[in-house]
Amino acid sequence: MTICTSDPIRFQGVKGRKVEAVFSGQTITSDGGGVLLRATDGVLRLLPRVARSFADSRRRASCAHSIENLLRQRVYALALGYEDLNDHDQLRHDPALQTAVGRDVEMASASTLCRFENSVDAKSLWSLSSVLVDVFIDSYKKAPEEIILDFDATDDAVHGKQEGRFFHGYYDHYCFLPLYVFCGEHLLAAYLRPSNIDGAKHSLGILGLLVKRLREAWPKTRIIVRADSGFCRWKLMRWCDNHGISYILGLAKNANLLRKAQPLLDEVHECFLQTGRKQKLFDETQYAAKTWDTKRRVIIKAEHLEKGSNPRFVVTNLSGSPEQLYKNYCARGEMENRIKEPFRRPHQLQQVAAQSISCAAVGSGVHAAQRHTPQSTCRNRTRPCPLRHYPSETFENRCFCDTKHSPDRLDAFGILPLQNTLSSCSIPAPGRVDREQ
């Protein structure tokens, strides 16, 4: 049952400006969620940490905008769906976004933000990647028993003659092929690559860096690598075996695998003929491709549908029943949902990372991919739990104090999904999509 409230929700003020969310109509803004992002970042302290990783070579006496404020302005606008820098010629005057950033005067122009983005170097991007992993680690009060690292690649369409663009036959357009690593909803790495490479390229290097950092923090936590058949490479599996890392990877079918699975396929086909309904059976075998260094455990899923046989194979070093292991492998679909979210929510484009890179130079394109990762982290932490109103406290204060709802996680502080939270905002936003109800 929907619980309605007419009481205002008070947020921390900004330079004498009172900030409240009210539900009585009046003049509203579609970007009131930026205030929630600010509250979330107040708990995570993500953007201040990211800002410290960026070198500032400007002459301080001539600067009107700090690196942190520039970062907040860009990241919050991305999370609200404003991808283009040109949007900031109008957004810089928006009171709602100014309040989220923490200013009561006009913010940086599109030109200033462009210079800021082009000044970011490889060292800063490396530091940004480290901050994302550190924030993920800090979100736990105690070390988890097990974590699953989901690897996946996807297409990132290019618009123009960017350096490093190539035509990809599978996706049927010119694109980059970024590599993503998730743990649940937490984006741990976004790595921009050209599309004329093996989809698994550099995945072993990124895995090694992640494992090193995670084991520094959680030496006893079990780490599982999960990915589709595009990442099934014997060097990656050998490295995992040698370093105590578990893996469960899709395995492309071939004639040898189908020959091993044929008895099970015949059995499931017979069951389908008897019942007329979909049938599914599981088994396992030992298998090694010619390039592999040793035989490994392969899970067989024999399935027969109305359209015919549908065999699937998974290679793993995990213990457990074949059926349960295959179900665990299929759970990686949630990670694919995180990547595909922008296409399901066109009003929140760019929310995962780099879905429309328009930078001409490769270096700027890499930053274009990386700059989406902080807003993805903030946005994902903004949606887990229901928002609660406590009249005696500001929202931020309650966020800092209220970690008792989850024994292990520090991010269960009670915030609604961004797009469903603020029905109205008491701050008018001239020049924006404002209306009277």
Image: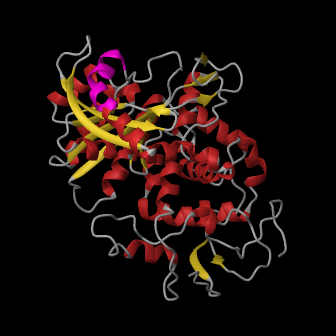
The secondary structure making up most of the magenta span is: helix
Q: Residue placed farthest to the top in the image?
A: 290
Quadrant, the C terminus: bottom right
420 relative position to 392: left or right: right
Residue 187, image quadrant: top left
Task: Report the number of numbered marks.
Answer: 0
Q: Which of 67 and 97 is in front in this view?
A: 97
Q: In which quarter of the image is the N terminus?
A: bottom right
Q: Which colour scheme is used?
A: secondary structure
Rendering coords of residue 100 (x, y %): 61, 63
**Residue 137 % position (x, y):** 31, 52
Query: Observer-nearest residue: 306 or 334?
Result: 306
Residue 52 appears in the picture as rendered: no
Q: In this view, does 181 lie to the left or right of 212?
A: right
Q: Does the magenta stretch include residue 81?
A: no
Please name whichever residue, 396 or 207, is drawn nearer the observer in this view of the structure: 207
The answer to whether 329 is drawn above or below residue 178 in the figure is: below
Decide: is 289 above or below 44: above
Up-down relation of residue 126 to residue 176 (above or below): below
Query: Measured from the top left, where is residue 172 in percent x and y?
Result: 64, 22
Displayed quadrant of residue 240: top left
As for residue 258 lying within the magenta part, the answer is yes
Question: Residue visible at 54% across and 41% down?
Answer: 353
Is residue 145 something one can see in this rendering?
yes
Q: Position of residue 30 (x, y in %)?
A: 72, 63
Residue beneath the point at 46% across and 59% down:
381
For the point 32% across and 75% down, which residue is it? 404
Residue at 28% across, 39% down: 282
Quarter of the figure with residue 310: top left
Magenta range is 254-266
